[in-house]
């Protein structure tokens, strides 16, 4: 159940990150949602690691307001890093 919760939250976080990120990212909403899922997994794992000291994804974290904020911040970070990678490969 926790993986499904983080995937759903990642879709939502990717859409929110795409809408709020100030720069042009390229790609479509699907790529933003995939990056949102990656950001949600990484952000959720780090949040749980800081909070409990164990490295795991739990649905209890995903379904809280801090979990949503962490997922959105993780999605924004993933979109930013993807933009850096794309810019360096185009140069």
Image (cartoon, helix red, strand yellow):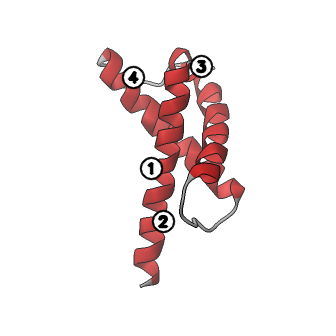
Q: Locate the C terminus and report the quarter of the image it occupies.
A: bottom left
CA gap between label 3 and label 1 equals 20 Å
Looking at the rendered image, the disc whose residue lies closer to the viewer, 4 or 2, is 2
- Front-most of 30 and 57? 30
Expressed as whole percent of the image width and height from the top left, the position of residue 53 reads 29, 18
Expressed as whole percent of the image width and height from the top left, the position of residue 82 reads 48, 61
Corner quadrant of residue 3: top right
Expressed as whole percent of the image width and height from the top left, the position of residue 10 reads 61, 38
Specify whether 84 is left or right of 3: left
Corner quadrant of residue 22: bottom right
Q: What residue is rendered at 57% in x and 65% in y? A: 25
- In the rendering, which numbered label is found on residue 77? 1
Question: Residue at label 2?
Answer: 83
Question: Residue at label 3?
Answer: 63
Q: What residue is rendered at 39% in x and 27% in y? A: 47
Numbered disc 4: secondary structure:
helix
Instruction: Determine contact: label 3, label 4, CB under 8 Å.
Output: no
């Amino acid at each position: 159940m926790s993986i499904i919760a983080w995937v759903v939250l990642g879709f939502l976080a990717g859409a929110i990150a795409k809408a709020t990120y100030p720069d042009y990212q390229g790609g479509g909403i699907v790529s933003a949602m995939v990056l949102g899922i990656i950001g949600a997994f990484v952000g959720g794992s780090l949040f749980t690691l800081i909070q409990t000291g164990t490295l795991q994804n739990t649905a209890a974290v995903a379904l809280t307001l801090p979990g949503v904020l962490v997922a959105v911040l993780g999605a924004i970070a993933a979109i930013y890093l993807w933009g850096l990678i794309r810019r360096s490969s185009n140069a």
